[in-house]
Image (spheres, rainbow, N blue to C red):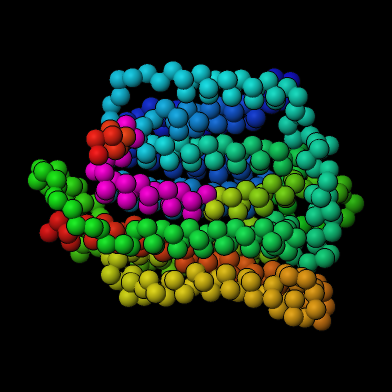
């Protein structure tokens, strides 16, 4: 009973940590890391939804004769998250490359310092 | 699970960004283990290769260029904390309305999923349901995602390959710091003294590449497929570039070839769709690719996965080359 929603709770905690990192840290790399955490938490949520108790990985196998039919976990969330992970790393790379450029033109990757420099200019 | 929470909180707290990056890698790897226990073997595969492998390399590459110490802040951020707690509270409240975890009659298992599970084996002849759904039933989505990766690869190259504009040099001290930090990390690539890494990687790389090919072509039957294979293949090359040098990796695959490969993957994918249209079906309708619909599906999935694999490999390598190449440009300019 207590553990019925345990996976979802872990997801929420991870999501909160990620969100807090994005909002409260001024360092741009730390923000990207927070964004990655946020992403990972959503992955966990989807995969948890796809799980069926007593199920197995969604790869078709012939059931043993006379045995009960095999329960497969839901493959759809797996497909969505599989592609989301790879797309996620591609977008992270794009963000990091922007951070590198920001460092080169401002000399800092701290949000507050950048805003200060902009005001002075 | 608790390890996961501990890991994320450490990521939040530590100031040194290198430590934070390593912790993020550990969190990703733990997450991959949890995915295995949740029956998502394909996803776990991808998460382990991408989250713990490639993205850590990218973060470290960036840190080498921008410096690893986070500024110590005195101000306590109250507003974000309140917003976070509010969001978290609302979600906690929402979980009480959710159906129980892992029950077989949850709404998520009701709509299209049973059809995939029951019929995909007969319709496509591919035992791995994740692969058949990915490449066939949801082929449009995957095409879109491949294009996103393609765009991201091109974007990173465009952003990072431009030569830096001449600007007045900042105070010399800072520059000196930057130079030493760069020399310590990036230009340390491929030094001649590391005999053990050289030998070990020479032994390992062929196996990594073989394994990537196995994952690519065995994706129909076991966990694996184009996305995972692409990432593993790229990881093999990145290892080579890290241990030997970027120059030697460029001899094998230079940027122009990579650019062509990125486009080639998307072209193969789109080409399969166009061919099926020319044969009188819909876009990405594999049934017509062969005289027998099941064979056609199988062939279509195989071709599309190859397209995905090529694009992912090339895009990851393009991103890696762009980052490392950038660092080398900086070193040259400092010299």
Please, which residue is most extreme toward the left here? B172
Count of numbered circles in the view: 0
Q: Find residue B237 and report its horizontal and vertical position in percent.
A: 40, 65
> Does the magenta segment cover residue B120?
no
Q: Can residue A21 be seen in this view?
A: yes
Left or right position of B89 against B119: left
Left or right position of A105 against B272: left
Q: Is residue B68 above or below residue B146?
A: above
Left or right position of B89 against A94: right
Q: What stretch is highlighted in magenta?
A: A88-113
Q: Nearer the viewer, residue A94 or B92?
A: A94
Q: Find residue B266 and report its horizontal and vertical position in percent.
A: 57, 69
Instruction: Please identify the dominant SS of the magenta region.
Output: helix
Residue shown at the point (48%, 51%) measured from the top left: A91
Left or right position of B100 against B272: right
> Does the magenta segment cover residue A94?
yes
- Quadrant where the N terminus of chain B is found in the figure: top right
């Amino acid at each position: 009973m207590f553990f019925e929603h345990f996976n979802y709770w872990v997801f929420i905690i991870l999501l909160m940590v990620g969100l807090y990192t994005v909002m409260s840290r001024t360092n741009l790399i730390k923000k990207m890391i927070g964004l990655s955490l946020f992403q990972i938490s959503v992955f966990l949520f989807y995969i948890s939804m796809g799980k069926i108790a007593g199920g197995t990985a969604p790869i078709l196998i012939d059931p043993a004769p006379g045995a009960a039919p095999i329960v497969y976990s839901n493959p759809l969330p797996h497909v969505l998250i599989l592609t989301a992970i790879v797309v996620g790393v591609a977008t992270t790379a794009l963000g990091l490359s922007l951070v590198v450029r920001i460092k080169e033109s401002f000399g800092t990757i701290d949000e507050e310092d950048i805003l200060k420099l902009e005001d002075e200019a | 699970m608790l390890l996961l929470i501990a890991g994320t909180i450490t990521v939040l707290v530590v100031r040194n960004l290198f430590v934070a990056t390593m912790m993020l890698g550990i969190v990703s790897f733990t997450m991959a283990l949890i995915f295995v226990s949740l029956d998502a073997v394909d996803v776990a595969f991808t998460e382990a290769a991408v989250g713990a492998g490639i993205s850590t390399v990218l973060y470290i590459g960036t840190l080498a260029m921008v410096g690893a110490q986070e500024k110590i802040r005195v101000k306590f951020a109250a507003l974000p904390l309140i917003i976070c707690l509010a969001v978290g509270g609302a979600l906690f409240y929402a979980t009480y309305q959710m159906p129980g975890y892992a029950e077989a009659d949850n709404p998520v298992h009701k709509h299209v999923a049973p059809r995939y599970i029951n019929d995909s084996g007969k319709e496509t002849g591919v035992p791995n349901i994740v692969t058949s759904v990915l490449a066939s039933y949801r082929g449009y989505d995957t095409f879109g995602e491949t294009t996103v990766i393609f765009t991201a690869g091109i974007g990173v190259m465009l952003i990072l390959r431009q030569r830096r504009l001449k600007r007045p040099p900042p105070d010399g001290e800072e520059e000196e710091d930057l130079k030493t930090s760069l020399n310590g990390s990036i230009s340390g690539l491929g030094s001649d003294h590391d005999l053990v890494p050289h030998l070990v990687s020479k032994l390992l790389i062929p196996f990594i590449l073989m394994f990537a090919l196995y994952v690519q072509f065995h994706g129909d039957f076991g966990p694996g497929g184009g996305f995972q294979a692409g990432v593993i293949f790229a990881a093999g090359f990145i290892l080579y570039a890290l241990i030997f040098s970027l120059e030697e990796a460029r001899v094998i695959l230079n940027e122009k070839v990579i650019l062509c490969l990125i486009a080639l993957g998307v072209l193969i994918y789109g080409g399969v769709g166009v061919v099926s249209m020319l044969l009188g079906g819909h876009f990405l309708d594999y049934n017509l690719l062969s005289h027998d619909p099941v064979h056609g599906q199988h062939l279509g999935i195989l071709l599309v996965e190859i397209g995905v694999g090529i694009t992912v490999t090339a895009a990851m390598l393009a991103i890696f080359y762009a980052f490392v190449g950038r660092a080398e440009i900086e070193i040259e300019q400092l010299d």
